[in-house]
């Protein structure tokens, strides 16, 4: 690895602070400090905390000035339209809060919509709103900038919250997060911005409150035996660092820095490591939080932002972050984040319950992640940073639906404009390839014009997370939902999709049509882990994929075996063993497409254009193919199951999905038209099946040709095996649900298998999607003379009927490969 940049640019330091700015809404942004491995050796090895004995007298104020600039952006050209827009957004939010702020002596709350102020959600949001006002007061060119009246009112309001709601005499109630992260972070940001105006006694009182509820980054205060992990640890490290700087407490700042590496517990919960269980980054690119939730796009981005923010805040100080293992963050940019960002959008398959948040759509969380990557690049080694800049430039330039510059604050605008103006950086094309995130039950297939993400679940990874009033209708989001992204429709999931889509008909899922109650968990959050083991797949050459999930429906007898085979420009979906005995209809949803406000996309079935009237529906018996303009084609190789089509306008409210204390959606009705295609398996089906081919971007003519020529041959679709052959590419792809044989290929147990003949050789990829076998044996249907290359876990017996013996024990569903001849 090259030597890191010796110093951070001013813009890096300014831009890194966007995590603190409440308006525009972004979940975070980062900067990174330089690596100082020699200084950090003692910490990395688990020794006691170290500080520089000769701390410069101005080290605290230097860091606090940097923290202030990280929030406000420092000096900028307010006449520039992009900066002016970001400033106008801040001004508008601050003006509204200032106008409605109760400044009377008899007040019982600061704002009428945040009552009672003693409720943790209410006082936490009150601090957040005060931070917006403080940011406007401290930002050059803002309407409230430098106002004595505003500063005095803010000091008084902070004192009111301390005396009334948040002080060392209080005991935690409700959601712990408000007490230990939400309120103290916003409070400390206010203290940073107002530090020249806050009386010493007030500052001491505020710091005492933070000390009570967030004394260190290592432990949950309301449960002292619980070690903090992942994003929560990163958030608390920032809080403790700001506390230490404001208190001029060197040991406290060092405690915060060491929390990133978990010096206290000898690195057990370090953020700078890959994990094999629990929360954190995995070597395969997965990110998990709350033990069992795929959370790259929410908690993962927060972790990256918090850790890198700390690096920027403390760079060049006696407490600089210099753990050499920070390189794990660099690796995560490419392996964890890039595959799940499509033209600046964060894929909903990795955002957990955040999909229900009206103010955190895919483009908003995507902008936060893009900011994190871009800002980290400004301090990372050139060998990795140059590629990130090119990638980020492509993300920014391609998203014209929700432009990045309109989603972020002043600091990020500065850094992005600098990048966009740099002609030496050529925007990178979209990432392509196939990714199996076996440690979080997610699969992403990326082609030049489109991407598909599969959200699977098992006894290891939750089907959904709910709680704190969020994600009330997320029942089927982990049951094989297929998210199709195309460059021509970047608003598919961010344009009112979640409050309006039929939650019982999510694309890719097989469902029991029973009505469901809202997901509620009381205080806190909760997850649902189904009982199935099989969920995952294999990848061959980074290009082809086989994915599988054995569905065990919640609260229903429905069981199904579902496979997806992902090739160059097609997704082949097979299902078998679809069985239920509850007396209800079971459906497999092929498509449910948001048509946005126009709703005029043409639907064609077997060459005949169908009506575009809202409310139109029809059942097609024996349909061979369908096509939806702007999306692509659908081929039905075995047209025995009736195909249903529906156009409908659907109206919902964000409040139907989210009633959270600080995330609640609006009650304003949202209406969107949809085109839906589904296969009806009837009432209480027994061993039903389905097969369809998705052709993203295909024309009606190309879809008709595919339906007629059938370049994909379905060899088996039964309870033992799903197997297809693609003659043009020499590919055979299979899911073995149990020991069995198909097309001369024999497996000793459940397996995802990809086999490709090319030239004079063969490539093989195998995975155990159930994560529970010791050894797999795979017998191939052709002669093998020699082994060109094989993983250490693969033993090949050559000959006329070669057998591969794969040691899958402990591989957690990851792919094993061999090259044969």
Image: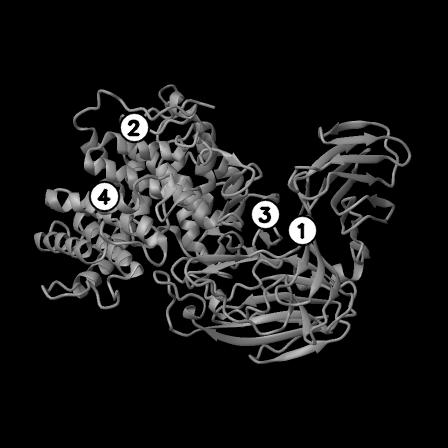
| Tag 2 near tag 3, CB within 8 Å | no
- Dot 3 surroundings within 10 Å: few (below 14), some, or many (20 or more)? some
Q: Which mark is residue 76?
A: 4
Q: Residue at x 41, y 35 (%)?
A: 377
Q: Residue at x 22, y 51 (%)?
A: 167
Q: How far apart are labels 3 and 1 at the CA level?
A: 33 Å
> Which of 73 and 707 lies nearest the eye of the viewer?
73
Q: Where does label 3 land, which residue?
A: 448
Image check: 407 left or right of 593? left
- Dot 2 surroundings within 10 Å: few (below 14), some, or many (20 or more)? many
First reached walking from the N terminus: tag 1 or tag 4 = 4
Residue at the far right in the pictured view? 800
Q: How far apart are labels 2 and 3 at the CA level?
A: 44 Å
Tell me if I can see residue 392 in this picture.
yes
Circle 1 SS class:
loop
Q: Where does label 2 land, which residue?
A: 319
Image check: 239 left or right of 587? left
Tell me if I can see residue 64 in this picture.
no
Circle 4 SS class:
loop
Query: Nearer the observer, disc 4 or disc 2?
Result: 2
Tell me the quarter of the picture where residue 307 sits: top left
Tell me the quarter of the picture where residue 105 sits: bottom left
First reached walking from the N terminus: tag 3 or tag 1 = 3
From the top left corner, tell me how far across and down residue 61 is, in percent. 18, 33
Query: Nearer the observer, disc 2 or disc 3?
Result: 2
Q: Is residue 238 above or below residue 533?
A: above
Q: Which mark is residue 533?
A: 1
Q: Which mark is residue 708?
A: none
Image check: 286 left or right of 10? right
First reached walking from the N terminus: tag 4 or tag 2 = 4
Q: Is residue 799 above or below residue 507?
A: above
């Amino acid at each position: 690895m090259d030597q890191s940049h010796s110093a951070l640019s001013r813009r890096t330091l300014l831009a890194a602070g966007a995590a603190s700015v409440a308006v525009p809404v972004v979940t975070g942004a980062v900067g990174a400090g330089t690596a100082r491995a020699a200084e950090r050796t003692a910490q990395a090895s688990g020794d006691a905390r170290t500080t520089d004995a000769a701390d410069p007298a101005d080290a605290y104020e230097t860091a606090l000035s940097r923290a202030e600039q990280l929030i406000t952006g420092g000096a900028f050209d307010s006449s520039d339209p992009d900066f002016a827009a970001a400033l106008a957004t801040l001004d508008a939010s601050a003006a509204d809060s200032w106008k409605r702020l109760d400044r009377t002596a008899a007040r019982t709350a600061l704002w009428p919509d945040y009552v009672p102020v003693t409720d943790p959600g209410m006082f936490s949001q009150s601090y957040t709103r005060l931070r917006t006002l403080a940011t406007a007061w401290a930002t050059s060119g803002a309407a409230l900038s430098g106002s004595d009246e505003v500063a005095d009112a803010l000091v008084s309001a902070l004192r009111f919250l301390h005396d009334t709601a948040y002080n060392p005499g209080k005991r935690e109630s409700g959601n712990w997060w408000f007490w230990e992260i939400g309120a103290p972070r916003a409070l400390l940001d206010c203290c940073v911005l107002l530090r020249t105006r806050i009386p010493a006694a007030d500052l001491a009182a505020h710091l005492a409150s933070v000390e009570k509820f967030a004394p260190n980054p290592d432990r949950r205060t309301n449960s002292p035996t619980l070690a903090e992990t992942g994003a929560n640890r990163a958030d608390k490290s920032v809080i403790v660092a700001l506390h230490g700087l404001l208190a001029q407490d060197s040991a406290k700042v060092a405690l915060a820095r060491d929390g990133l590496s978990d010096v206290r517990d000898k690195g057990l919960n370090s953020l700078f490591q890959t994990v094999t269980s629990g929360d954190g980054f995995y070597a395969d690119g997965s990110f998990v939080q709350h033990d069992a939730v795929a959370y790259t796009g929410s908690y993962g981005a927060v972790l990256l932002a918090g850790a890198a923010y700390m690096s920027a805040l403390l760079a060049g100080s006696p407490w600089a972050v210099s753990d050499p293992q920070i390189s794990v963050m660099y690796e995560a940019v490419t392996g964890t984040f890039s595959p799940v960002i499509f033209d600046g959008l964060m894929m909903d398959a990795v955002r957990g319950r955040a999909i229900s948040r009206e103010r955190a759509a895919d483009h908003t969380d995507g902008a936060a992640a893009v900011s994190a990557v871009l800002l980290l690049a400004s301090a990372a080694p050139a060998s990795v940073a140059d590629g990130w800049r090119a990638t980020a430039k492509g993300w920014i330039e391609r998203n014209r639906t929700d432009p990045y510059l309109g989603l972020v604050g002043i600091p990020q605008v500065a850094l992005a404009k600098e990048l966009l103006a740099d002609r030496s950086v050529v925007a990178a094309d979209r990432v392509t390839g196939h990714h199996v995130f076996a440690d979080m039950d997610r699969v992403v297939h990326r082609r030049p014009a489109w991407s598909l993400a599969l959200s699977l679940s098992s006894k290891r990874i939750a089907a959904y997370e709910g709680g704190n009033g969020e994600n009330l209708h997320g029942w089927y989001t982990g049951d094989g939902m297929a998210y199709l992204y195309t460059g021509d429709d970047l608003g598919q999931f961010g344009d009112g999709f979640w409050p309006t889509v039929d939650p019982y008909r999510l694309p890719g899922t097989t469902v029991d049509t029973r009505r469901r109650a809202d997901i509620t968990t009381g205080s806190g959050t909760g997850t649902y882990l189904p009982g199935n083991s099989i969920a995952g797949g294999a990848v061959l050459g980074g290009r082809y994929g086989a994915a599988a999930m054995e569905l065990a429906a919640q609260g229903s007898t429905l069981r199904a075996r579902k496979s997806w085979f992902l090739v160059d420009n097609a997704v082949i979906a097979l299902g078998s063993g679809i069985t239920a005995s509850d007396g209800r209809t079971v459906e497999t949803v092929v498509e449910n497409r948001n048509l946005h406000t126009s709703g005029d996309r043409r639907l064609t079935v077997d060459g005949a254009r169908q009506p575009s009237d809202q409310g139109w529906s029809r059942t097609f018996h024996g349909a061979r193919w369908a096509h939806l303009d702007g999306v692509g084609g659908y081929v039905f190789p075995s047209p025995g199951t009736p195909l249903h089509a529906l156009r409908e306008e659907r109206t919902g409210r964000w409040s139907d999905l989210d009633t959270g204390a600080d995330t609640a959606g609006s009650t304003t009705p949202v209406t969107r038209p949809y085109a839906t295609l589904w296969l009806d398996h009837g009432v209480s089906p027994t061993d039903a099946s389905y097969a369809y081919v998705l052709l993203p971007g295909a024309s009606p003519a190309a879809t008709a040709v595919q339906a007629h020529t059938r370049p994909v041959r379905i060899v088996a679709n039964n309870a033992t095996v799903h197997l297809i052959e693609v003659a043009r590419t020499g590919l055979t792809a299979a899911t073995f649900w149990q020991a069995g044989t198909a097309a001369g290929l024999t497996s000793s147990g459940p397996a995802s298998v990809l086999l490709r003949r090319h030239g004079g050789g063969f490539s093989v990829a195998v995975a155990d999607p159930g994560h529970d076998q010791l050894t797999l044996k795979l017998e191939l249907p052709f002669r093998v003379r020699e082994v060109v290359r094989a993983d250490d876990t693969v033993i090949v017996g050559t000959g006329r009927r070669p057998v591969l013996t794969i040691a899958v024990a402990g591989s957690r569903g990851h792919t094993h490969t061999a090259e044969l001849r």
